[in-house]
């Protein structure tokens, strides 16, 4: 593309026309004419093509300006009849704004909904309204908008309570019903009507125009040019990459332009990619089409005449204009609505609004968005026209949906998505149902789009093509519409509503009939199935319909007549379904225990069975309602109860339940995973309400109408267990049937499942209508049983509970009755714990437990009982009574068939022989007996007269079997089993049963007669004696068990401890040795009473001691010696900006950067950390080579990455898996020679001056000749004792030398981001710098954590610092000596001016700790050539003092102006210091002059010095301590007062630091002068550079707001900085500097080191030297990034009231900042542990490794 966007001139022809144009005249002319259409069209035909589309690029600014002048202004004038600026203002003034807020949401904007008051979850408030509403005190939900939709504030139907915020509260004096048009003159109304008609017609004409080269009548341009656009349209088929690639080829543009085109096409739906004559554009089109037609349908491209495009551009503009103008007045809005909905000449559905809607799918995205917006701000904001619009929408519904099926755009840009705005208004929905039959329409449309059916007319998803699958996904949105329509239940029914609802129900039943029995399965025998059958589509449908089915039941529950009719219809539908099923089912007769029943022969394991039975289940739901609403008792004559055939009702649900049981036993293993998945979902909380639960209810309903013996026999038969229990000698089962172990096992499991089913049929009474319970009892019971498994977090509970259509579980209402809340700590989450008094309601056979849940709950509950010292038996809980309709179900418990079964199992259990019965089978039998006993007990207790109680299980269980077999009674069997040794686990339960039997007998006997009381009493006594005995035994056993457990726990604890210990073991070795040396001070030359000093000739000398460490790899011990085998410490070197005081400094150019001096802003540093694990260097090398080799093989094979980058030298510590990228060699302590006489400062300055001169000349000789010429100074004779060409012997062994090079190179490579180069002179500098930086960072950490300077560091950090310092002092041996000497000379020159060193920095540009460390460590290279006996210690002290003075000067120069504080009282000692500070300051002022403000208060100055220098002194103490190994005085191991003096003493400093200067004033004065006259000083002080003041504060992560929605709001107004005001899709906040970034998006990708990276990665390189900490605002997720390839997500510091985070913002609970958690993140950052954290996260979760972090 040639022309840039802005440099297009407005053609001069237009300029003259523009100058001559009069808005007023044009408008007046229009006011005269009769045919306004013609006139305006003529005007537009003339001007529009002259304003828009004159070249290759559109130019929005000048186009908009001209359009406003020439096109809109006359329209506005016409509208107002006067100058629009006054006319519109008048309109606005007279306007009475509507009470609706109507704020349209931007993408990502926070929206709020009230869980308590919203009519449905789609009712939302904008932030403004929310904050002014009552709901902010309620339980609310916060989400981010996907864009579109508007604030419902002011809509009384949307809120059950508090519909208005403070701002939109209606004024009582206003009459809401008043017609807004009343305020307008008729003239005005007429004009307005005219102009809106013309403009809207024009816009509709143009936007729906589909000709490329012609214009509508009246708009043809006066002169046509041969100018065309090649217009590219958006679709959802092609990817960004495809489009970009194609465009580069077709229109020959750069990648960047192509990206921009693609972005615009994606956003606006179309974009012209070429401008020119027809042939030119046609060519581009053909290339694009050719290039994209290979795999899929080609990209849509049109060659359009420029005038067509121009008019379309203005048409959009015109719609915007309309939206803008109606904003002035509700009256104008009403007129526009009227214009839009006015029926056109073509009759029905021909209004302009209809036309737009019906062409929706043909328009491009941008056009759709604009007119949708207009609809929202006009039709949807006017209550009268909203209704009319809704009717039109409903009338067109079918066609709109059909168009949408073919549309290649997502639903958000389809007009169909407006349904949510219309259908969720309850009155509107009801009106549409009654008047437009909307319910039927939606369901019909839905069913029509699912064409594939099998022979029985059921849905068939099996062989869906991609196209059909796509359509199936689309068509699901119709269910969403249906949900909206039904979401609010009617409070009143009209006959018409009844009629239409039932008509809708009929259609719905047609739909369900197509689902009844779909996807049937047949058990696979022999071979495994070849292909997993499709099952997901059917389940998707079921899942989507779940809420609809529930809602339909709820509608029915609000009207008796509707319920009765619905029940009849449903029953008819079911009968219809069944009529087709009777294929080959032969009748058979079953008989057992003297009962017999007729049924059909059917085997689940052999014939077809389906899990989909929605019709049966709906009927089950309605049946419960008959009971709940008591319709069954009040209008029995109206119900078709006589038509019910209970066996028919239960048949299919029973088959389904049997199928589940058989799948559990493994009988269906060959049918693959699809069936397992189906069974899973059948029970899953998302589906079970309308699947499993209803099947169970249907069984209950059926059984309640049948003879219980018949019911049980049918159940036995369907479970294929009939033959086992029916045979006469079934009790001898274990004697026969040992043929096939698998079959036995199978039958055992089936029996267990069947017994469980019987328990559920009799025991599940917590649904209102089945049992006599309240609505909330059911949910209470669910929660209770969840918490019986273990304490759970709020979100876990929510997940385990079914949600209603409002996404609510109803948990909040009841949770406090059953649970108490425990708050979380810094990690973990808040948990709900079961209230102890609720444990007795625990039912081990709770119907929603999976087998796993059940065993976990059993274990937990037994444990609880043990802890409370109770019997661990878990008897069934007491149940509520049944409702009358289901009351007969209890008889199952005392029927003959059940007793027969119970007896059989008990009899089997007498024999311990394994295999023929199972523990859980017995457990279930005992449970069933318990249920029966409790039932009897309850009935006895609740009845006033005992005769009422016909339920007599105790009687039946005591009855022995019939004559021929004479089997024992159930009771006898129980008593027999009580003491069976192999049934020890059941002993408690059996005892409980027998006790209950006794209790019941007593109750009965007591009422029957009193004579037997005595005998039963004595028996009771016997029993208690027996009980006591048992109790004692039990107690002993229990104690033994507890002891055992304790021992086991201890052992495992010890084991764990041992492992941890082992890790520490190796770290401690160094530490312990050091510690032991510190106790032997008497051998040091310093007298023992002298204070400890770590630097200078008087420094304490710890006794020499061997240091022995153990290699973690070979476990061998090794002494650390200079000439020994090298030992190394695993280390991780990284660049850091954690302490940066200047994040604006651009990164250095690695090639030319001179790192010798660190700027005090510490903008980039190199940090070294270590896990403290020591290895032999050769062991490590072998390990690393192995890792490398393995990695190479792995990458070739799997192409997966690891959490570490071997190519970059990274590896994981072999012991602790800590990320490392190099090793530091361990070196022995430097001993230093103790000598007597040492030179004073003056003499040393002289000597060193001479030495430096000598070195200068020596170095010069080494340089090439050419440079020598310039320096013609005479040769400087070296002092005799200083031999410049003496090459000292290297004290280190070869392996140590090698390791010295290794670590040096690694630090250099990482610190400067360069390729390794062992020869680079900057290597030693980087090592010293890293040492200094690491010390500073640790010093800061100790301050931040409020820990003492010494003794609180973990030993790994101590070891790391020691080895860094000692390495630093040795690293010169590995480098070229003159180079290191050169560094020393230049470093020293910053303090002592040296004419031969150029460009020494000014002292304000030098970080003094870095200088100290570098100068001390580099001195070794100079000292090695000195043989005068000058001690290193003396020199170090001189250097230290000098730098300390320099630092004081630095602090005084940068100390801020005096604060206005009261003069402080100070003691005598302080007086001297203050005075000294004053004197030094005034000396400085004489040198520097007026740039230094006058300060009168010495107190202020001394305080500045003291606080400013402290971090430096502490750093120096750490440095010398680790360098020399001098133990620190005990005072520094604690946070006690008086630290200053101790610290100064330890550092051999006077506590009045100013004495350093005043004591040597005449020597230091010249230096001071030199420092102050450096040109940099003036420049910096006058604001020319970065002025850092001391002490430097620790950096913190940015402050975050307490309320998370404030962040969301902030992010929602953030626009992408690169694509002109577009909203960013993934706004991401840098927590280090607070920048908001447009992450994870094409628009903000930049190139970094030759690779495309996302905004976050790019930002980390500037802001965090490659390490970044971000908050992804939309996701509520912390993101850690390191380098380009590493990253992980981390829990955000925001928690909801339940102490849980919400990553992904899925739950929408309000979130608040948790300060502890944020501090934890900050600590990770300050400790430089982010990279390591990422490493651990990636090791733990391999999927993290695969993420393209660099594109975030
Ligand atoms: Zn609002
Ligand atoms: Zn409001
Ligand atoms: Zn509320
Ligand atoms: Zn080793
Ligand atoms: Zn380690
Ligand atoms: Zn962007
Ligand atoms: Zn940042």
Image: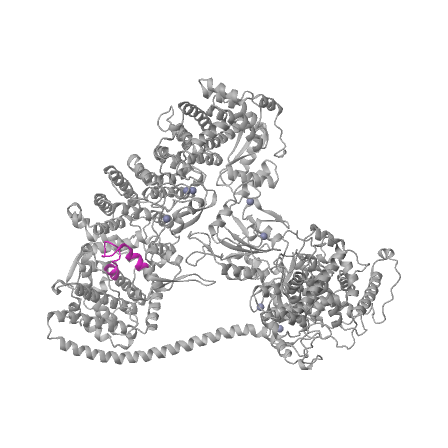
Answer whether residue 1414 is visible to the viewer in this image. no
Total label count? 0
Give above or below for 1721 relative to 253: below
* Place of residue 515 in the rendered image (x, y in percent of width and height, measured from the top left): 31, 46
Horizontally, residue 319 falls left or right of residue 1423, namely left
Horizontally, residue 1725 falls left or right of residue 894, namely right
The picture quadrant for ligand 2 comes to top left
**Where are the magenta residues, as a range?**
758-782
Which of the 4 image quadrants contains residue 1549? bottom right
* Place of residue 1041 in the rendered image (x, y in percent of width and height, measured from the top left): 36, 77
* Place of residue 597 in the rendered image (x, y in percent of width and height, measured from the top left): 17, 57
Horizontally, residue 1279 falls left or right of residue 671, namely right
For this orientation, the residue located farthest to the bottom is: 1082
Which of the 4 image quadrants contains residue 1473? bottom right
Asked which colour scheme the image uses, the reply is one colour
Instruction: Give the residue displayed 39% in from the left and 53% down from the top.
Output: 530
From the image, which quarter does the N terminus lie in? top right
Residue 759 sits inside the magenta stretch: yes
Which of the 4 image quadrants contains residue 1669? bottom right
Horizontally, residue 323 falls left or right of residue 892, namely right
Instruction: Give the residue displayed 47% in from the left and 45% down from the top.
Output: 109
Foreground pick, 1712 / 951: 1712
Answer whether residue 972 is visible to the viewer in this image. yes
Foreground pick, 706 / 1359: 1359
* Place of residue 363 in the rendered image (x, y in percent of width and height, measured from the top left): 46, 33
Give above or below for 942 relative to 125: below
Residue 702 sits inside the magenta stretch: no
């Amino acid at each position: 593309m040639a022309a840039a966007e802005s440099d297009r001139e407005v053609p001069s022809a237009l300029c003259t026309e523009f100058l001559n144009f009069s808005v007023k005249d044009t408008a007046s002319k229009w006011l005269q004419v009769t045919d306004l259409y013609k006139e305006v069209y003529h005007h537009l035909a003339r001007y529009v093509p002259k304003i828009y589309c004159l070249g290759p690029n559109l130019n929005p600014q000048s186009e908009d300006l001209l359009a406003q002048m020439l096109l809109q202004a006359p329209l506005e004038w016409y509208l107002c009849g006067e100058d629009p600026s006054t006319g519109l203002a008048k309109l606005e003034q007279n306007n009475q704004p509507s009470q609706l807020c109507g704020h349209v949401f931007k993408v990502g904007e926070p929206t709020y909904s009230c869980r308590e008051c919203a009519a449905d979850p789609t009712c939302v408030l904008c932030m403004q309204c929310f904050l002014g509403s009552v709901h902010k005190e309620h339980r609310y939900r916060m989400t981010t908008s996907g864009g579109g939709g508007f604030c419902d504030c002011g809509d009384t139907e949307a809120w059950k309570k508090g519909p208005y915020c403070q701002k939109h509260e209606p004024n009582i004096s206003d009459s809401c019903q008043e017609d807004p048009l009343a305020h307008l003159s008729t003239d005005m109304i007429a004009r307005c009507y005219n102009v809106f008609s013309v403009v809207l017609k024009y816009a509709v004409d143009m936007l729906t125009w589909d000709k490329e080269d012609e214009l509508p009548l009246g708009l043809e341009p006066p002169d046509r040019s041969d100018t065309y656009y090649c217009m590219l349209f958006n679709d959802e088929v092609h990817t960004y990459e495809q489009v970009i690639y194609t465009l580069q080829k077709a229109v020959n543009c750069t990648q960047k332009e192509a990206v921009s085109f693609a972005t615009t096409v994606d956003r606006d739906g179309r974009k012209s990619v070429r401008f020119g004559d027809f042939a030119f554009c046609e060519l581009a089109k053909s290339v694009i089409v050719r290039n994209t037609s290979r795999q899929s349908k080609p990209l849509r491209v049109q060659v359009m005449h420029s005038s067509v495009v121009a008019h379309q551009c203005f048409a959009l503009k015109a719609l915007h204009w309309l939206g803008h103008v109606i904003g002035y007045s509700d009256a104008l809005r009403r007129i526009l609505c009227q214009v839009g909905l006015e029926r056109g000449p073509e009759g029905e559905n021909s209004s302009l609004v209809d036309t737009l809607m019906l062409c929706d799918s043909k328009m491009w995205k941008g056009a759709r968005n604009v007119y949708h917006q207009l609809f929202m701000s006009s039709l949807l904001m006017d209550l009268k026209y909203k209704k009319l619009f809704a009717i039109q929408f409903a009338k067109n519904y079918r066609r709109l949906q059909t168009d949408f099926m073919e549309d290649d755009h997502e639903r958000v840009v389809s007009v169909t998505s407006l349904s949510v705005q219309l259908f969720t208004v309850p009155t509107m929905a009801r009106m549409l149902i009654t008047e437009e039959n909307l319910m039927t329409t939606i369901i019909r449309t839905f069913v029509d789009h699912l064409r594939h059916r099998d022979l029985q007319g059921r849905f068939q998803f099996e062989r869906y093509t991609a196209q059909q699958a796509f359509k199936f996904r689309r068509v699901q949105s119709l269910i969403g519409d249906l949900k909206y329509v039904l979401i609010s239940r009617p409070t009143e029914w009209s006959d018409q509503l009844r009629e239409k609802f039932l008509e809708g129900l009929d259609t719905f039943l047609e739909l369900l009939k197509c689902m009844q029995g779909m996807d049937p399965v047949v058990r696979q025998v022999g071979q495994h199935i070849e292909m997993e059958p499709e099952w997901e589509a059917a389940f998707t449908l079921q899942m989507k319909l779940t809420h609809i089915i529930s809602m339909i039941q709820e509608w029915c529950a609000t009207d008796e007549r509707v319920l009765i009719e619905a029940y009849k219809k449903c029953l008819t539908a079911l009968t219809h379904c069944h009529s087709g099923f009777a294929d080959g089912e032969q009748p058979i007769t079953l008989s057992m225990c003297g009962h017999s029943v007729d049924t059909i022969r059917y085997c689940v394991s052999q014939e077809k069975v389906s899990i989909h039975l929605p019709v049966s289940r709906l009927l089950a739901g309605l049946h419960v309602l008959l009971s709940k609403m008591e319709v069954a008792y009040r209008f029995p004559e109206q119900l078709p109860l006589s038509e019910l055939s209970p066996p028919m009702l239960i048949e299919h649900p029973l088959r389904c339940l049997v199928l589940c049981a058989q799948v559990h036993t493994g009988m269906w293993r060959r049918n693959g995973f699809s069936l397992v998945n189906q069974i899973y979902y059948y029970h899953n909380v998302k589906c079970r309400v309308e699947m499993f639960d209803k099947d169970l209810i249907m069984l209950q309903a059926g059984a309640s109408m049948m003879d219980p013996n018949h019911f049980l026999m049918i159940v036995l038969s369907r479970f294929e267990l009939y033959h086992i229990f029916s045979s006469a000698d079934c009790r001898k089962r274990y004697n026969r049937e040992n043929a096939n172990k698998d079959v036995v096992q199978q039958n055992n499991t089936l029996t267990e499942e069947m017994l469980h089913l019987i328990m559920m049929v009799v025991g599940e009474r917590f649904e209102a209508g089945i049992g006599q319970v309240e609505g909330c009892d059911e949910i209470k019971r669910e929660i209770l049983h969840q918490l019986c498994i273990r304490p759970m977090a709020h979100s876990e509970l929510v997940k385990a509970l079914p949600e209603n259509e409002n996404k609510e579980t109803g948990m909040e209402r009841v949770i406090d009755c059953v649970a108490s809340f425990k708050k979380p700590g810094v990690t973990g989450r808040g948990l709900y714990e079961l209230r102890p008094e609720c444990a007795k309601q625990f039912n081990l056979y709770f119907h929603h437990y999976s087998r796993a849940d059940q065993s976990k709950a059993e274990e937990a509950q037994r444990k609880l009982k043990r802890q409370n010292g109770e019997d661990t038996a878990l008897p069934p809980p007491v149940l509520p009574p049944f409702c009358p309709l289901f009351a007969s179900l209890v008889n199952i418990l005392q029927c003959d068939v059940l007793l027969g079964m119970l007896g059989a199992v008990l009899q089997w259990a007498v024999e311990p022989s394994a295999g023929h019965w199972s523990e859980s089978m017995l457990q279930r039998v005992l449970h069933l007996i318990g249920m029966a006993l409790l039932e009897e007990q309850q009935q006895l207790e609740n009845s006033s007269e005992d005769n009422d109680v016909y339920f007599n299980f105790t009687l039946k269980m005591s009855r022995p079997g019939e004559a021929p077999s004479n089997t024992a009674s159930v009771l006898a069997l129980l008593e027999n089993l009580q003491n069976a040794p192999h049934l020890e686990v059941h002993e408690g339960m059996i005892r409980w049963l027998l006790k209950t039997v006794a209790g019941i007998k007593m109750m009965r006997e007591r009422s029957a007669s009193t004579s037997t009381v005595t005998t039963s009493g004595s028996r009771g006594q016997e029993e208690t004696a027996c009980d006591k005995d048992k109790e004692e035994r039990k107690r002993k056993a229990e104690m033994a068990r507890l002891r055992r457990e304790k021992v086991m726990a201890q052992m495992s604890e010890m084991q764990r401890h041992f492992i941890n210990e082992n890790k520490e073991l190796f770290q401690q070795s160094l530490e312990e040795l050091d510690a032991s040396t510190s106790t032997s001070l008497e051998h040091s030359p310093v007298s023992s009473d002298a204070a400890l000093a770590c630097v200078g000739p008087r420094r304490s000398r710890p006794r020499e001691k061997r240091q022995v460490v153990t290699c973690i790899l070979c476990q061998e011990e090794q002494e650390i010696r200079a000439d020994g085998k090298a030992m190394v410490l695993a280390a991780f070197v990284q660049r850091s900006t954690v302490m940066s005081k200047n994040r604006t400094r651009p990164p250095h150019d690695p090639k030319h950067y001179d790192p010798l001096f660190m700027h005090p802003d510490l903008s980039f540093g190199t940090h070294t950390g270590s896990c403290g694990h020591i290895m032999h260097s050769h062991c490590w090398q072998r390990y690393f080579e192995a890792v490398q080799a393995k990695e190479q093989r792995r990458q070739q094979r799997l192409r997966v990455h690891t959490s570490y980058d071997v190519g970059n030298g990274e590896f994981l510590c072999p012991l602790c898996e800590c990320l490392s990228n190099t090793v530091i060699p361990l070196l022995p302590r430097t001993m230093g020679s103790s000598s007597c006489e040492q030179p004073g400062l003056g003499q040393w300055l002289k000597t060193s001056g001479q030495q430096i001169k000598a070195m200068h000349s020596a170095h010069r000789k080494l340089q090439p000749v050419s440079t020598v010429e310039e320096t013609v100074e005479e040769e400087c004779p070296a002092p005799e004792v200083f031999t410049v060409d003496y090459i000292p012997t290297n004290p280190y062994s070869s392996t140590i030398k090698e390791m010295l090079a290794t670590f040096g190179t690694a630090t250099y490579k990482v610190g400067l981001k360069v390729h390794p180069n062992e020869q680079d002179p900057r290597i030693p500098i980087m090592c010293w710098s890293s040492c200094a930086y690491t010390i500073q960072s640790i010093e800061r950490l100790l301050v931040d954590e409020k820990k003492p300077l010494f003794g609180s560091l973990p030993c790994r950090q101590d070891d790391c610092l020691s080895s860094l310092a000692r390495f630093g002092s040795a690293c010169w041996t590995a480098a070229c000596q003159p180079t290191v000497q050169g560094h020393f000379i230049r470093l020293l020159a910053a303090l002592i001016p040296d004419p031969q060193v150029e460009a020494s920095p000014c002292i304000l540009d030098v970080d003094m700790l870095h200088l100290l460390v570098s100068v001390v460590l580099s001195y070794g290279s100079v000292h090695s050539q000195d043989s005068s006996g000058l001690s290193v210690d003396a020199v170090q002290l001189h250097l230290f003092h000098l730098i300390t003075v320099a630092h004081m000067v630095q602090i005084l120069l940068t100390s801020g102006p005096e604060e206005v504080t009261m003069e402080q009282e100070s003691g005598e000692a302080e007086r001297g210091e203050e005075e000294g500070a004053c004197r030094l300051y005034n000396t400085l002022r004489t040198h520097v002059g007026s740039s230094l403000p006058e300060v009168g208060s010495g107190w202020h100055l001394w305080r500045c010095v003291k606080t400013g220098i402290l971090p430096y002194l502490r750093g120096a103490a750490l440095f010398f301590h680790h360098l020399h190994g001098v133990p620190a005085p005990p005072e520094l191991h604690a946070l006690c007062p008086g630290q200053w003096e101790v610290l100064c003493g330890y550092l051999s400093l006077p506590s009045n630091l100013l004495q350093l200067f005043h004591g040597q004033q005449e020597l230091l004065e010249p230096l001071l002068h030199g420092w102050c006259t450096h040109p940099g000083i003036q420049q910096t002080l006058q604001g020319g550079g970065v002025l850092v003041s001391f002490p430097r504060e620790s950096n913190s992560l940015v402050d975050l707001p307490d309320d998370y929605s404030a962040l969301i709001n902030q992010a929602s107004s953030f626009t992408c900085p690169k694509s002109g005001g577009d909203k960013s899709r993934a706004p991401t906040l840098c927590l280090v500097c607070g920048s908001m970034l447009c992450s994870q998006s094409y628009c903000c990708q930049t190139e970094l080191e030759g690779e495309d990276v996302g905004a976050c990665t790019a930002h980390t390189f500037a802001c965090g030297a490659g390490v970044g900490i971000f908050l992804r605002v939309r996701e509520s997720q912390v993101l850690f990034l390191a380098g380009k390839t590493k990253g992980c997500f981390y829990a955000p510091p925001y928690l909801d009231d339940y102490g849980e985070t919400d990553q992904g913002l899925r739950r929408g609970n309000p979130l608040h900042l948790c300060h502890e958690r944020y501090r934890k993140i900050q600590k990770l950052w300050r400790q430089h542990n982010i990279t390591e954290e990422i490493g651990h996260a990636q090791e733990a979760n391999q999927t993290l490794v695969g993420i393209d972090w660099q594109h975030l």
